[in-house]
Amino acid sequence: MSKVLVSDPIDQAGIDILSQVATVDVKTNLKPAELIEIIGEYDALMIRSGTQVTKEIIEAGTQLKIIGRAGVGVDNVDVPAATRQGIVVVNSPEGNTIAAAEHALAMMLSLSRYIPDANASVKRNEWDRKTFVGAEVYKKTLGIVGLGKIGSHVAAVARAMGMRLLAFDPFISTERAEQIGCQLVDLDLLLQQADYITLHIPKTPETTHLINAERLAKMKPNARIINCARGGIIDEDALAAALKEGKIAGAALDVYESEPLGESQLRAIGKEVILTPHLGASTTEAQVNVAIDVAEQIRDVLLGLPARSAVNIPGLNPDVLEELKPYMQLAETLGRLVGQLAGGRVELLNVRLQGELATNKSQPLVVAALKGLLYQALRERVNYVNASIEAKERGIRVIETRDASVKDYAGSLHLEATGTLGTHSVTGALLGDGEIYLTNIDGFPISVPPSQYMVFTLHRDMPGIIGKLGSLLGSFNVNIASMQVGRKIVRGDAVMTLSIDDPLPDGILTEIIKVPGIRDAYTVTL
Ligand SMILES: NC(=O)C1=CN([C@@H]2O[C@H](COP(=O)(O)OP(=O)(O)OC[C@H]3O[C@@H](n4cnc5c(N)ncnc54)[C@H](O)[C@@H]3O)[C@@H](O)[C@H]2O)C=CC1
Ligand SMILES: O=C(O)C(=O)COP(=O)(O)O
């Protein structure tokens, strides 16, 4: 039975799903050293934002197949390290969208009406109606930085409250922004015009300290800023200084450069600052959503099925995979075959997607072909997650072409590998019943289903050669299951493909090459 470690608090609905297929250990608040010590036992790790999944933890997780983030942000996971190790990283892209958007909106209204401080004063038995005179958001300008899932929901609600909307997001189109009712502007203009600014972007090297002293200085003195995205997008020291100097009117933060928040000048500022302890996703509904979403994906991956929201396997979503499924095995088989024919170190792989495969959706087939190609070198260590990165690190260049005009089969795949020992090519297709067929080897047409052990020869098409090869193999007790010759012209060059019942014993290949008329021979294990 697989083992799953849950190292941050998640909803019981997720634990129930994981328990269907695995032994589940819930161990929260582990120190990094404690996690490193035990992670080697586990097949999957499920986390929220509390656990920092560093390179060291990933390297110690020698059995790990999947890391599931019950939430959106994966900035607490060293995703490149996981990818290199073939570990799929999944998240729940939509499970907490509404919760996070509503928290940002609650922060905006709370900042405007000083609700936290007003509440605290009444609880202290005061009745102060002067200090807490606020501002309306109606007809004010809201600047949304990051118009993704959360930013878009914030926009929809803010629009209903009568706000004017500006957005900065270099990765979305003006049309999309207009559909949501936002005017797409550059960051400077947004900073200069907005009365409220709300951040909904991921934390990346580009967004770290995006809001620094210089940008805070561009904001209006009555402006208020809200960060329910990630700590570190705002420079907290610069923010505290801007608030103290009255350069801006308020700030509401849910996330911090370091969590839990330690010593901070922000605590000393009064009603202009609201601080919550990373509560954006903390609603009952969101926690059920993300726990189910991620637990289902962990369950599926442990059962050998694809994950729907993998952040490190581009293009591999389950709908596309379902369509491509029969072809994935074809691509992997051809990759294994061409890699062994090429022998030596492969430097270039040409992948031609033909017929109905000539669409952008077929990209996973390229990954499957690479997985097959690298199998010789990496065995079970190569998978769909790390095949591309492993190929890149080995200096294998991949050229992908598409040719819809090839109509011999509904869809076919042609691979050509060039390495230190020469160039070889294979083509394959699926026949009516979905069975894989090899349809061409090194330019010679054939029609053979691949088998586990195969021998290929390049020879001159002449009488007697098949008999000689048959008796040679017979003398070594090698049983031939099937045999086929492919040739372009009579008595010209030809290719012979043999399926044999057992691996070819050592030393026989050199005997085969000695048969007059045979120029070359290869044996492969598929
Ligand atoms: N406080 C909390 O508990 C929660 C925080 N979050 C955080 O909220 C953030 C947004 O989440 P979603 O809307 O779901 O993500 P999303 O991926 O749907 O949207 C992010 C948007 O940011 C844009 N973007 C990326 N880099 C940018 C840049 N340099 N400048 C401007 N825009 C940029 C992208 O184009 C995208 O449209 C994430 O950082 C996530 O971790 C999410 C849920 C809960
Ligand atoms: O989903 C996100 O990105 C969040 O920040 C939520 O974090 P949490 O799961 O509540 O620790």
Image (spheres, helix red, strand yellow):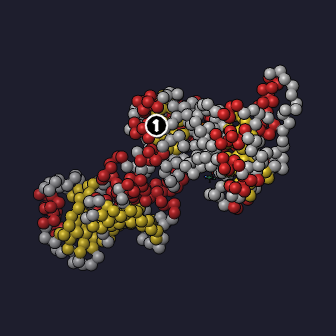
Q: Using the image, determine if residue 175 lies above or below residue 403.
A: above
Residue under the image location 62 percent in, 57 percent down: 171
Residue 27 higher or lower than 334, as above or below: above
Quarter in which the C terminus is drawn: bottom left
Q: Is residue 250 visible?
A: yes
The residue drawn where x is 16% and y is 65% is 513
Residue sticking out furthest to the top: 125
Q: Is residue 179 visible?
A: no
Give the left or right position of residue 136, taking residue 275 as reference. Answer: right
The residue located at (24%, 72%) in the rendering is 494
Task: Label 1, secondary structure: give it.
Answer: strand
Residue 231's x, y, as percent? 61, 40
Residue 368 drawn above or below residue 120: below
Of residue 79 and residue 489, the one placed in the foreground of this image is 79
Q: Residue furthest front?
A: 245
Label 1, on which residue? 44
Disc 1 Cβ-to-ligand 2 distance below 8 Å: no
Image quadrant containing the N terminus: top left
Marker count (numbered) = 1
Q: Is residue 395 left or right of residue 266?
A: left
Q: Is residue 483 left or right of 464 when viewed as pictured?
A: right
Q: Identify the amino acid type marked 1.
A: Ala
The residue closer to the viewer here, 450 or 94, is 94
Q: Position of residue 455 (x, y in %)?
A: 23, 60
- Seen from the viewer's position, the closer of residues 393 and 467 is 393
Where's residue 343, x and y in %? 26, 60
Ligand 2 located in image quadrant: top right
In the rendered view, tell whether residue 216 sits above or below residue 443: above
Q: Residue at x 67, y 50 (%)?
A: 215
Label 1: how many Cα within 10 Å (few below 14, some 14–19, many 20+): many
